[in-house]
Amino acid sequence: MSLERLVTRYIRSAEHVLDEIKVAATSEALDKDTVVEVIDQARAYVDDAKYYRTKKRLDVSLASVAYCEGLLDALKLLELVKFEWPVRRKESSENARAPTRK
């Protein structure tokens, strides 16, 4: 897979999550506005990734979308948001055939 196709796939995946993301109940130490601010920063990284893709700076584009994914994954690990990363059909069918480990 070319770097450009990879970047495009990652951007689409991040945009899908940003369209579907739900903010969970937050603790007193971290209010909803702070979570939304981090989500907005993730959106900005996707915008950067798209900009650099158009400029053929695919290395910077990939780094930008990776930052976005990192922010989203951190929020999810902290249970501050709810979302699922999209799964590609080919990967899903391969995983369905893979033996399970016990």
Image (tube, grey):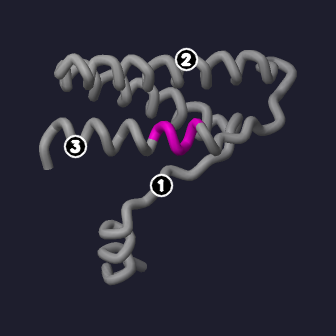
Image x and y of residue 95, in percent: 35, 73
User: Residue beneath label 1, please?
Assistant: 86
User: Residue beneath label 2, please?
Assistant: 41
Q: Is residue 31 left or right of residue 68?
A: right
User: Residue beneath label 3, please?
Assistant: 5
Image x and y of residue 90, in percent: 31, 69
- SS at mark 3 in the image: helix
Establish if 15 lies above or below 83.
above
Q: Is residue 30 left or right of residue 86?
A: right
- Mark 2–mark 3 Cα distance, whole angstroms, equals 24 Å
Q: Nearer the viewer, residue 17 or 31?
A: 17
Task: Kindly report the secondary structure that dominates the magenta region of the rendered protein.
Answer: helix
The residue stretch that appears in magenta: 14-18
Dot placed on the residue nearer the N-terminal end, 3 or 1: 3
Dot placed on the residue nearer the N-terminal end, 2 or 3: 3
The crowding category of the residue bearing disc 2, from other C-alpha atoms within 10 Å (few below 14, some 14 to 19, many at least 20), is some
Image x and y of residue 40, in percent: 60, 20
- Mark 1–mark 2 Cα distance, whole angstroms, equals 21 Å
The crowding category of the residue bearing disc 3, from other C-alpha atoms within 10 Å (few below 14, some 14 to 19, many at least 20), is few
Residue lying furthest front: 54
The crowding category of the residue bearing disc 1, from other C-alpha atoms within 10 Å (few below 14, some 14 to 19, many at least 20), is few
Image x and y of residue 51, in percent: 33, 18
- Residue at x 50% of width, y 50% of height: 85
Q: Could you tell me the amino acid type at mark 3?
A: Arg
